[in-house]
Amino acid sequence: MHYTAQWNDDVHHLLHAAATGENTGYYADFDNFEERSGMLGRALAEGFAYQGEMKPHEGMKRGEPSEGLPATSFVVYMQDHDQVGNRVKGDRITRLASDDAVKALIAVYLLSPQIPMVFQGEEWASSHPFPFFSDVPTELREVVRSGRQEELKSTPEHEDPNKPDVEEAVDPTSVRTFASAKLDWSSLKKEPHKSWFQHYRDLIDLRRMEIVPRLSGQNGFAGEYQLLGIKSVLVTWKMGDGSTLRLYMNLAEETQESVPPIIGRRLFLQGYSEEARLGPWTVLWTIEV
C-alpha cells in the first residue's frame, strides 16, 4: 500500500556471484552452478529467487511468492552503496571481474523489464573505490572503527581466506577515506571510461525506445524461464503491449551449445550467437511483436 517497488537483492547476488566467482557469505546461497541459472531466471521472470524456501546461509526461510507481481515492482542493479561500501576496501565490480563479464551483467539488468538503478560512477567504470565512511565526533571515532571491523566479519569477504582481512579495512572516520570515494569527473574525457560511458548511454537509449514503451499494462505472471544449460537460461516476458521480450544469456566462460531457435527481432547482442550456440558471456535480447 505504501510503496510501488523494492530492491531485488537476489538478482544482484546472482549476477555478482556469476561474474566474480565469489561464493562465501550470502553469496554461498547462490553458488550452486546447477541451480544458479534457474534461480537467476526465476528472479528476473518472477521477482525473487527465494520465495519462501530455506536460505542456507541464513538458516531460515526467505522471501514470499512474487510471480503475481509485474516486473516494475522490483528495482534491479549490479552495484549499490551497500554491496560496494561493505567490502573491505570498497572495491567496485570492475576490479573483481573481467570486462566481458561486467558488460554481460550490464546488458542483463539495464534492459530488464524490472527497474534498473545505476550506482554513482558505475556508468563510466570509475576506478575510485567506494569505502564506508562516517563523520563522527572525535570521541566516537574509535567506537566506529572497531564497530566497522566487527561488521565486516559478517560479510562474504571475511569468510574467504583469499580476500583481505578486516584489519586491512580503511579508517571510516578519516577524511582521506571520504575523499577517496569522490568521483573524478574528468575521467569521462579519458579512455577506457569514455567508452564505458557511451556503452551505458547506448543501452539506456535502447531501453527508452524498446523496453519502456512496452511496460505499461504489464500484468503479474508475465515472466517465465527455461534452463538452456548449467550456466545458461532463456527468460521470456509478455509485455504490456502484447509483445514478447526474450533474453538468452550465457554467464560463463564456456560456450553453450544446443540453444533453441532464436525468435524475434534482435534488439541487442553482447558476445556472439550463431548456429544454436551462445558464446562466453553472451547476452541476446529479442522482441516479437
Image (spheres, grey):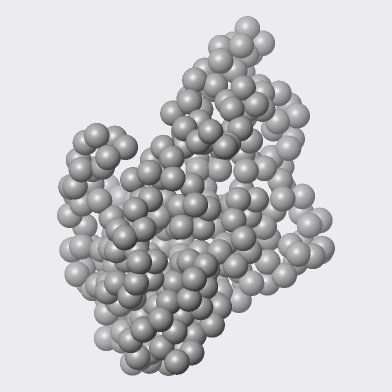
Instruction: Please state the horizontal and vertical placement of residue 272, each as a whole percent of the image.
Output: 54, 82
Residue 147: image x %, image y %?
A: 52, 17
Q: Is residue 29 visible?
A: yes
Q: Vertically, is 170 above or below 47?
A: above
Q: Is residue 104 left or right of residue 121?
A: left
- Which residue occupies the foreground of this view, 104 or 144? 104
Q: Residue furthest top?
A: 139
* Residue located 71% across and 42% down the image: 182
Q: Give the tally of numbered discs.
A: 0
Q: Residue at x 70, y 31 (%)?
A: 177
Residue in the image at 53% along x and 53% along y? 20
Residue 227 as seen in the image, left or right of residue 250: left
Q: Is residue 214 above or below residue 11?
A: below
Whether residue 121 can be seen here = no
Q: Nearer the viewer, residue 60 or 65?
A: 60
- Residue drawn at x 68%, y 72% as measured from the top left: 198
Residue 5 picture location, percent across and down: 33, 55
Q: Give the quarter of the figure containing the C terminus.
A: bottom left
Which one is in front, 275 or 265?
Answer: 275
Side (left or right) of 187 relative to 150: right
Q: Quadrant of residue 97?
A: bottom right
